[in-house]
């Protein structure tokens, strides 16, 4: 607005009110458009997420042919329903209905943004059987190797995540080590040049498994009966 317009608004209270009304209308319309866009795109986002998880689930739970969703509540593990809120577990079963493992989401900050994965936990070997990256914006050719590097992915064929005698956490923390120095089954052989991304994967797996592995073992009968 020119200095003349500003002076005119100052001298004319009615003009000021009209300007404020116009600004308020613009702000309201902008807010409505944001809400409308969110409501329109949310089902698409949720459906894409569901499909991504379903594709990943059968990769991180070897031998799984079907799935059943569960939710961790204050009362323990229960079959998922719209009324229940909590952490979602995706149980995988073979053709005969036997539990093969449980898939869970985990996330942590990487080099550029949050990395989100789905990992498979085998309660019978108490180990992580695989990971699949669901979301990341890491540097191409460096940080994104966590989804492609065969040596790194070999860590998750049977990464130990054994529950301790107290049943409250893991017997050993899942930790990253320098590539070529892994000596223990709970260690993750990192990717050279992608230390931050490797550490993020180790951190998210440790944080998630410390919390979820004891719950899975405690309520494993519910999961086994859920197919």
Image: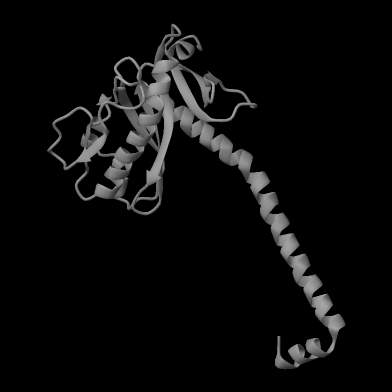
Q: Is residue 119 left or right of residue 180?
A: right
Q: In the image, what residue occupies the spot 21% across and 35% down? A: 151
Query: What residue sits 43% from the left and 14% below the top?
Result: 220
Q: For residue 4, which quarter of the picture? A: bottom right
Residue 220 shows in this picture: yes
Q: Is residue 52 left or right of residue 108?
A: right
Relative to 30, residue 54 above or below:
above
Q: Position of residue 134 (x, y in %)?
A: 42, 38
Residue at the top extreme, as displayed: 96
Q: Quadrant of residue 145?
A: top left
User: Which residue is at the front of the view, 82 or 30?
Assistant: 82
Outermost residue on the front side: it is 166
* Snapshot colouring: one colour
Residue 110 place in picture, x, y as percent: 35, 49
Q: Nearer the viewer, residue 46 or 21?
A: 21
* Residue under the image location 35 percent in, 50 percent down: 138
Which x, y percent locates residue 199? 28, 44
In the figure, 124 relative to 170: above or below? above
Q: Residue at x 78, y 66 (%)?
A: 25
Decide which of 175, 37 is in the foreground and name it. 175
Residue 65 shows up from this direction:
no
Residue 78 to residue 211: above or below: above
Q: Is residue 20 left or right of residue 51?
A: right
- Counting from the top left corner in percent of width and height, residue 105 is at 43, 33
Image quarter where the N terminus lies is: bottom right
């Amino acid at each position: 607005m020119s200095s003349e317009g500003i002076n005119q608004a100052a001298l004319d209270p009615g003009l000021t009110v009209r300007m404020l009304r116009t600004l308020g209308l613009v702000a309201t319309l902008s807010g409505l458009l944001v809400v409308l866009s969110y409501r329109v795109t949310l089902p698409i986002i949720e459906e894409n997420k569901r499909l991504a998880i379903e594709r990943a689930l059968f990769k991180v739970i070897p031998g799984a042919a079907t799935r059943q969703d569960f939710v961790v509540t204050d009362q323990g593990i229960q079959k998922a329903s719209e009324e229940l809120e909590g952490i979602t577990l995706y149980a995988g079963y073979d053709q005969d209905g036997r539990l093969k493992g449980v898939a869970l989401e985990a996330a942590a900050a990487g080099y550029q943004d949050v990395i989100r994965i789905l990992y498979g936990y085998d309660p019978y070997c108490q180990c992580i059987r695989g990971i699949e990256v669901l979301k990341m914006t890491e540097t191409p050719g460096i940080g994104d190797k966590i989804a492609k590097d065969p040596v790194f992915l070999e860590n998750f064929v049977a990464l130990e995540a054994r529950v301790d005698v107290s049943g409250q956490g893991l017997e050993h923390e899942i930790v990253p080590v320098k590539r070529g120095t892994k000596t223990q089954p709970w260690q993750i052989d990192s990717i050279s040049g992608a230390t931050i991304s490797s550490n993020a994967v180790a951190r998210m797996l440790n944080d998630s498994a410390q919390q979820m592995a004891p719950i899975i073992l405690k309520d494993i009968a519910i999961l086994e009966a859920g197919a």
